[in-house]
Image (tube, rainbow, N blue to C red):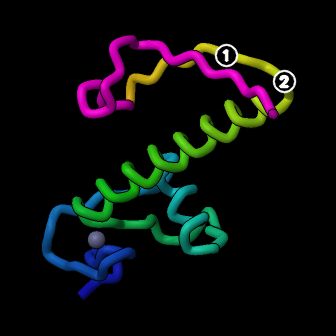
Amino acid sequence: MAFSEVCRICLSVNICMFVLKKTGLQNLYKTLTNSFMDENEDPIIVCLTCHARLIRCRRLQQQAIDSNAVLKQLLAGGSMVLSIPSIKRKENVFSSAKLSLSFNPT
Ligand SMILES: [Zn+2]
């Protein structure tokens, strides 16, 4: 079995595979594995399931980055209006596409 036929995350074989080389997911994989990739190294191959997991992980990472930026701005005394397209409004009983936030320390 060739190394390139194995998913680098779950070790599955003989299923649909994706190559992560030269995608943002390759950097995420390196972050998750604390690894440094050589440009000459074999491309990272992952299965369909792990590819979807990496995409969800990237979304979570981006949401955390965005939320951290908002909180930092609020703690610095600012206020802002946010677009919240990722929030399921019916489940959270939001009636507007915008949410106003301000921070008032008491
Ligand atoms: Zn996999």
Q: In what element is the residue under mark 2? A: loop
Q: Is residue 30 magenta?
A: no
Q: Which residues are magenta?
A: 87-106
Quarter of the figure with residue 102:
top right
Residue 7 in picture, x, y percent from top left: 31, 74
Residue type, mark 2 in image? Gly
In this rendering, position of residue 101 left or right of residue 46: right
Quadrant where the C terminus sits is: top right
Callout count: 2
Residue 82 in picture, x, y percent from top left: 55, 18
Ligand 1 resides in the quarter of the picture at bottom left
Q: Is 96 above or below relative to 93? A: above
Q: Which residue is mark 2?
A: 77
Graded by Cα atoms within 10 Å as few (under 14), some (14 to 19) or many (20 or more), the crowding at tag 1 reads few
> Residue 20 versus residue 87: which sits nearer the camera?
87
Q: In what element is the residue under mark 1? A: strand
Residue 35 in picture, x, y percent from top left: 62, 74
Q: Which residue is mark 1?
A: 80
Question: Does mark 2 have its CB less than 8 Å from ligand 1?
Answer: no
**Residue appearing at x 31%, y 25% in the figure:** 93
